[in-house]
Image: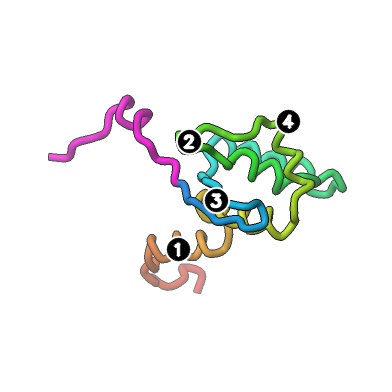
Amino acid sequence: MTSYLTKDAILGADDLPFEDVQVESWGGTVRVRGLTGTERDRFEFYLAAVKDSPDKVEVRAKIVGWCLVDADGKRLFTDKEAVKLGAKSGETLDRVFDVVRRLSGMGDKAKEKAAQDFGTAPDDGSPSG
């Protein structure tokens, strides 16, 4: 018989992945965690809202700021403080942002892995001959 998770078990699960990343240009190691569902929604909504706008600034800084955490998983930066990360090295922000994307299941490699996890659908042929 299958045992199903309870609401408390789901909400109590510690499911946010993290990774410690050496950032020599900042002089040490940072802990990066993946986006929460709410943060990812905010990120995707923001991208859609500014899609054709020149206001797409500080995206990496905001996302990295959301995901830099201390040893207990608490954010290091508030939303207001996170935009200050935009003044840091673009290459460094990009490297940390890539870790956030990977941990959050975003990007090409994550899509490829998801496709591999689901396997190949059987080819029943096209009904529209």
Q: Please name the amino acid that badge 2 sits on.
A: Gly
Query: SS for tag 2?
Result: loop
**Residue 113: mark in rendering:** 1
Residue 44 horizontal/vertical position (percent): 65, 43
- Tag 2 near tag 4, CB within 8 Å: no
Front label number (1 vs 3): 3
Residue beneath label 3, please? Answer: 29
Q: Which class describes the residues within 10 Å of circle 3: few (<14), some (14-19), or many (20+)? A: few
Label 4 belongs to which residue?
Answer: 80
- At 68% across and 53% down in the image, what residue appears? 93
The residue positioned 46% from the left and 47% from the top of the image is 18
Residue 68's place in the image compared with 124, above or below, is above
Q: Nearer the viewer, residue 6 or 99?
A: 99
- Who comes first in sequence, dot 1 or dot 3? 3
Where does the image place residue 66, in percent across and percent down from the top left?
61, 38
Q: Nearer the viewer, mark 1 or mark 2?
A: 2
**First to last magenta residue range:** 1-17
Q: Earlier in the sequence, mark 4 or mark 3?
A: 3
Using residue 11 as the reference point, say whether residue 100 is left or right of it: right
Amino acid marked by disc 4:
Lys
- CA distance for labels 1 and 4: 34 Å
Q: Residue at x 87, y 48 (%)?
A: 54
Q: Real-space Cα distance between discs 1 and 3?
A: 27 Å
